[in-house]
Image: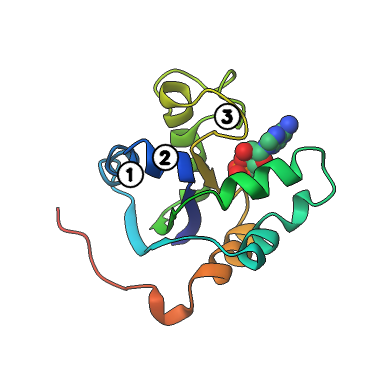
């Protein structure tokens, strides 16, 4: 079973889209195993976006991610990394397909509402910034 890491960005929270976004994963049968509402620290933000350090959008991205509270989520399902990215849509909302979260609700690349890990290695690295192993809950979904 695969796990991945998701963040609902500050504009998703400010726009009242937490329920709308989590619903899309739940209705697909994806299991939530970790859930935290938090205001990111500079240290957490720098760790999360370490691979983007030095890129032209880095400063704007970090400032935006610390502009309000976020929802950090760990989910579990078969092939869940690919499945979540399919539900989320392309990074640039202009290229995100209709029906995806970004394709329906996002306007700009920085404020693209949601982050989702793109590989097993990044999922492990990113979830460990926010969750310790005992924060992740094992249970069975009902049918
Ligand atoms: P996210 O999935 O959080 O991962 C990195 C983020 O950088 C990305 O979503 C965008 O919000 C942001 N970003 C801003 N500008 C760009 C860009 N030109 N290319 C890629 N990502 C960008």
Q: Residue at x 55, y 34 (%)?
A: 111
Marks 2/1 in contact by CB < 8 Å: the verdict is yes
Dot 1: what SS? helix
| Res 133 visible | yes
Which one is in front, 103 or 141? 103
Kindly indicate the quadrant of the structure image that contains residue 93: top right
Which residue is disc 1 drawn over? Answer: 18
Is 4 displayed left or right of 34 in the figure? right
Number of numbered discs present? 3
* Precedes in sequence: disc 2 or disc 1: 2
Mark nearer the viewer, 3 or 1: 1
Image height of 134 relative to 4, above or below: below
Q: Quadrant of the N terminus?
A: bottom left
- If the picture is divided into quarters, which one holds ligand 1? top right
* Precedes in sequence: disc 3 or disc 2: 2
The extreme bottom residue here reads 134
Which one is in front, 41 or 71? 41
Which one is in front, 105 or 86? 105
Dot 3: what SS? loop
Q: Residue at x 29, y 37 (%)?
A: 20
* Precedes in sequence: disc 3 or disc 1: 1
Q: How far is disc 2 from disc 1 in space, using C-alphas?
A: 6 Å
Dot 2: what SS? helix
Is 67 displayed left or right of 13 in the figure? right
The extreme left residue here reads 143
In the image, the residue with mark 2 has its CB under 8 Å from the nearest atom of ligand 1 = no
Q: Residue at x 21, y 60 (%)?
A: 141
Q: Which mark is residue 12?
A: 2
Which residue is disc 3 drawn over? Answer: 90
């Amino acid at each position: 079973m695969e796990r991945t890491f998701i963040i609902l960005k500050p504009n998703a929270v400010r726009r009242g889209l937490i329920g709308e976004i989590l619903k899309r994963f739940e209705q697909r049968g994806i299991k939530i195993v970790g859930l935290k509402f938090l205001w990111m620290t500079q240290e957490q933000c720098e760790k999360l976006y370490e691979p983007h350090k030095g890129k032209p959008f880095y400063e704007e991205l970090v400032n935006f991610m610390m502009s309000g509270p976020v929802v950090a989520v760990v989910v579990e399902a078969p092939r869940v990394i690919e499945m979540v990215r399919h539900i989320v849509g392309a990074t640039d909302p202009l290229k995100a397909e209709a029906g995806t979260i970004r394709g329906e609700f996002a306007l700009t690349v920085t404020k693209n509402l949601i982050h989702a890990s793109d590989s097993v290695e990044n999922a492990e690295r990113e979830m460990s910034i926010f969750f310790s192993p005992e924060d992740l809950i094992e249970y069975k979904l009902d049918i």
